[in-house]
């Protein structure tokens, strides 16, 4: 079974925690402590294959940006969240994209699975970021970035975000595995056959999945819309 680490980033109060909790627990959590970093595990089945997801819900506050960068380095896929009611949080998504590139040591347009999420579409009458702006921003983040609008409150499109991201990770990871397999096959052809067979490949589902630890959080209360 594959295990992927998904990093959720974005400015404060855009609904990152509400989005994550909606996906993990299938309910809307209105009151929540401001996040430093929280980790959640969920096993899902995507396109007939079981996948274990570790979802890291990161801090939006500036003072925790360096800590977020450490998580980004090991992430397989990323969810960049903004509030479609707050244009400033939309502009901030470009900074998070740059931080992802820096953490992954990649250049613009790199094949990094990213979903750009415009949250709070249940507040349509307060919209300040158009759908066209959201879609165009995702294109700036490269061909391997997709844009989806969601509502953590109603649950609209929340599952689609993580399901689509897993498919993108599968594509990215599958490409790397295929290259490794091809290189191994070429190496085997160039060497004389050995008298004994190679050791058995690892059996699927044999890796141990450990429960996620919950980092410390500040004890202030806020309301996530």
Image: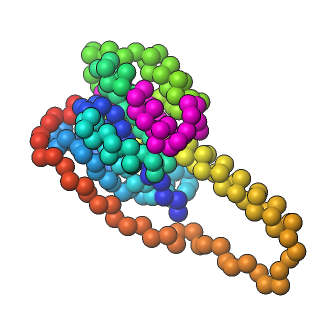
Tell me if 54 is positioned left or right of 120 in this view.
right
Tell me if 85 is positioned left or right of 115 in this view.
left
Tell me if I can see residue 47 in this picture: yes
The boundaries of the magenta stretch are: 94-120
Q: Which residue is depicted at the point 59% across and 73% down?
A: 203
Q: Position of residue 201 (x, y in %)?
A: 65, 73
Q: Which residue is depicted at the point 83% across and 84% down?
A: 195
Tell me if 10 is positioned left or right of 52 in this view.
left
**Vertically, is 157 above or below 210?**
above
**Vertically, is 216 above or below 77?**
below
Q: Residue furthest left?
A: 220
Tell me if I can see residue 117 in this picture: no
Verify whether residue 101 appears in magenta: yes
Q: Position of residue 172 (x, y in %)?
A: 60, 46
Location of residue 110 (image quadrant): top right
Q: How is the image coloured?
A: rainbow
Image label count: 0
Q: Residue furthest bottom?
A: 195
Q: Which residue is depicted at the point 81% across and 67% down?
A: 188
Q: Position of residue 123 (x, y in %)?
A: 27, 22
Q: Position of residue 192 (x, y in %)?
A: 88, 74
Q: Quadrant of the C terminus?
A: top left
Verify whether residue 192 appears in magenta: no
Location of residue 31 (image quadrant): top left
**Vertically, is 160 above or below 196?**
above
Q: Which residue is depicted at the point 34% across and 34% down?
A: 10
- Viewer-proximal residue among 206 and 78: 78
């Amino acid at each position: 079974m594959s295990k992927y680490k998904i990093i959720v980033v974005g400015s404060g109060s855009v609904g990152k925690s509400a989005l994550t909790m909606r996906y993990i627990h299938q309910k809307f959590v209105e009151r929540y402590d401001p996040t430093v970093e929280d980790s959640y595990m969920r096993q899902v089945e995507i396109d007939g294959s079981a996948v274990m997801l570790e979802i890291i819900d990161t801090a939006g506050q500036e003072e925790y940006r360096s800590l977020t960068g450490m998580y980004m380095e090991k992430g397989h896929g990323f969810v960049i969240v903004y509030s479609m009611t707050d244009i400033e949080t939309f502009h901030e998504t470009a900074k998070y994209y740059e931080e992802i590139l820096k953490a992954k040591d990649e250049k613009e347009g790199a094949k990094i699975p990213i979903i750009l999420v415009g949250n709070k579409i249940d507040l349509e009458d307060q919209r300040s970021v158009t759908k066209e702006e959201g879609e165009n921003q995702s294109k700036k983040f490269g061909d391997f970035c997709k844009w989806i609008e969601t509502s953590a409150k109603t649950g609209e499109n929340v599952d689609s975000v993580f399901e689509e991201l897993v498919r993108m990770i599968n594509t990215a990871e599958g490409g790397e595995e295929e290259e490794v397999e091809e290189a191994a096959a070429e190496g085997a052809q160039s060497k004389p056959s050995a008298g004994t067979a190679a050791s058995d490949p690892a059996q699927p589902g044999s890796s141990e999945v450990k429960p996620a630890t919950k980092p410390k959080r500040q004890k202030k209360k806020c309301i996530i819309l």
